[in-house]
C-alpha cells in the first residue's frame, strides 16, 4: 500500500487516444478509470487508517448505534374506591337490618309514640281538672292549697314535655332519624323522663295526702264536688305518671342498647 501509484502502473501500455502532456521522461499519469480505486487504496490517509472489513464495520455500527427507546408503559393505575356514602349519625342503615329487625323497630317506635301521647292526654286532663276546680268565692279553690297548685304545675309541665316527645317520635317514624343528634337525643329522653316522672309522682303523693286530710274536715262536707274533682285530677295525674314511667323504661332500654351495641335499636 505504500508503493507509489505511478510505479505500479508504469509498465501498462498507453492507448493511442490518450494525449501526452508531459515530458517523455516523466512517468505516465494514472488512468481515469482507476483514479477512484487508487485514491482509496493509495492515499496516505487510507494507508494510515485502513477501512475495516464489512462484518467488523457492521459490528462497530451496531455498537455505536443509539439504542431505540423502549416503548413507554404507563404504570398500572389502581382502581380508586368510591368514597363511602355520607353516613348520617342519626340514621339507621337498613341494609344491615333483617326484615324482623325492621318490624321490631316499627313496633318499638309506635309503642313509644302511643305512650307519649297517652301521657300527654292524661297530664293535660289532670291540669284542666285542677284549674277548673273552683265553685265560687264562697267555696274553696285549687289555688288555696299548696299541694293542688303543685299538682297543677307538675301536670302542666309533663303535658308540655309529652307533647314535645310525641312530635319527636312522629319525626323519628317518618324520617327514620332522631330530631337531635342520636347521643344527645337518647340522653335527653332518658334524663327528662326520669326527672319529670319523679316530679309527677311527688305531686301526686302530695295531692293524695291532701285529699285524705280534706275528707276528715268540713271542706268535703260543705263542698263535696270540690273534693271529688280533686280526686279525679289526682287519678288522671297518676295515670299520666304510669305512661311516663313506661316511656322512661323504653328510653332507658334504648340508651342501654346504644351504650352496648352502638345503636339505639334493640336486635
Image (cartoon, rainbow, N blue to C red):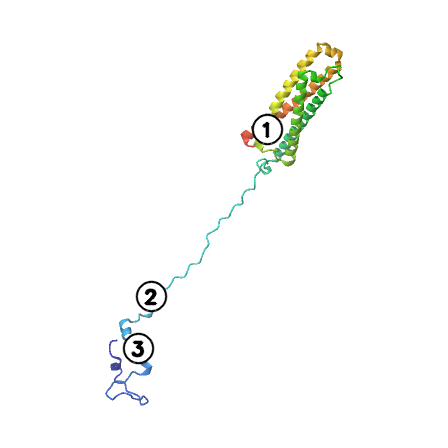
Q: Residue 188 bears which disc, if any?
A: 1
Rendered position, 4 above or below 238: below
- Within 10 Å of disc 1 (Cα), the crowding (few <14, some 14-19, many 20+) is few
Please state which of the two labelled residues, at mark 3 or mark 1, is closer to the viewer: 1
How far across and down, in percent of the image, does residue 193 sit? 61, 25
How far across and down, in percent of the image, does residue 64 sit? 35, 64
- Within 10 Å of disc 3 (Cα), the crowding (few <14, some 14-19, many 20+) is few
* First of labels 3, 2 by sequence position: 3
Q: Label 1 near label 3: C-beta < 8 Å? A: no
Label 2 sits on residue = 60
- Within 10 Å of disc 2 (Cα), the crowding (few <14, some 14-19, many 20+) is few
How far across and down, in percent of the image, does residue 97 sit? 59, 36
Work out how far the residue at label 2 is from the one at label 1, CA to CA, in angstroms.
90 Å
Work out how far the residue at label 3 is from the one at label 2, CA to CA, in angstroms.
24 Å
Q: Is residue 82 left or right of residue 199?
A: left
Residue at image location 65% in from the left, 34% down from the top: 171
Q: Which residue occupies the foreground of this view, 14 or 54? A: 14
Any part of residue 266 in sight: no
Q: Residue furthest front?
A: 137
Q: Residue 70 bears which disc, if any?
A: none
* First of labels 3, 1 by sequence position: 3
Residue 224, located in which quarter of the rendered image? top right
* First of labels 2, 1 by sequence position: 2
Label 3 sits on residue = 39
Amino acid at each position: 500500500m505504500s508503493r507509489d501509484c505511478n510505479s505500479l502502473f508504469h509498465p501498462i501500455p498507453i492507448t493511442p487516444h490518450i494525449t501526452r502532456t508531459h515530458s517523455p521522461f516523466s512517468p505516465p499519469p494514472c488512468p481515469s478509470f482507476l483514479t477512484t480505486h487508487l485514491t482509496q487504496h493509495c492515499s496516505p490517509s487510507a494507508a494510515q487508517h485502513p477501512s475495516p472489513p464489512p462484518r467488523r464495520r457492521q459490528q462497530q455500527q451496531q455498537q455505536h448505534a443509539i439504542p431505540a427507546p423502549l416503548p413507554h408503559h404507563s404504570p398500572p393505575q389502581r382502581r380508586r374506591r368510591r368514597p363511602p356514602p355520607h353516613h348520617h349519625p342519626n340514621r339507621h342503615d337498613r341494609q344491615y337490618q333483617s326484615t324482623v329487625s325492621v318490624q321490631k323497630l316499627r313496633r318499638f317506635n309506635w309503642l313509644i309514640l302511643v305512650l307519649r301521647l297517652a301521657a300527654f292526654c292524661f297530664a293535660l286532663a289532670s291540669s284542666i281538672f285542677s284549674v277548673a276546680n273552683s265553685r265560687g268565692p264562697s267555696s274553696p279553690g285549687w289555688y288555696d292549697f299548696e299541694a293542688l297548685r303543685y299538682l297543677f304545675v307538675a301536670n302542666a309541665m309533663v303535658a308540655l314535655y309529652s307533647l314535645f316527645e310525641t312530635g319527636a317520635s312522629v319525626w323519628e317514624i317518618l324520617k327514620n332519624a332522631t330530631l337531635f343528634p342520636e347521643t344527645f337525643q337518647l340522653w335527653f329522653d332518658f334524663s327528662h323522663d326520669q326527672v319529670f316522672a319523679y316530679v309527677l309522682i311527688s305531686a301526686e303523693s302530695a295531692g293524695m295526702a291532701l285529699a285524705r286530710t280534706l275528707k276528715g274536715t268540713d271542706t268535703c262536707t260543705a263542698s263535696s264536688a270540690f273534693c271529688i274533682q280533686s280526686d279525679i285530677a289526682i287519678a288522671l295525674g297518676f295515670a299520666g305518671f304510669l305512661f311516663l314511667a313506661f316511656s322512661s323504661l323504653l328510653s332507658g332500654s334504648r340508651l342501654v342498647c346504644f351504650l352496648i351495641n352502638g345503636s339505639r335499636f334493640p336486635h
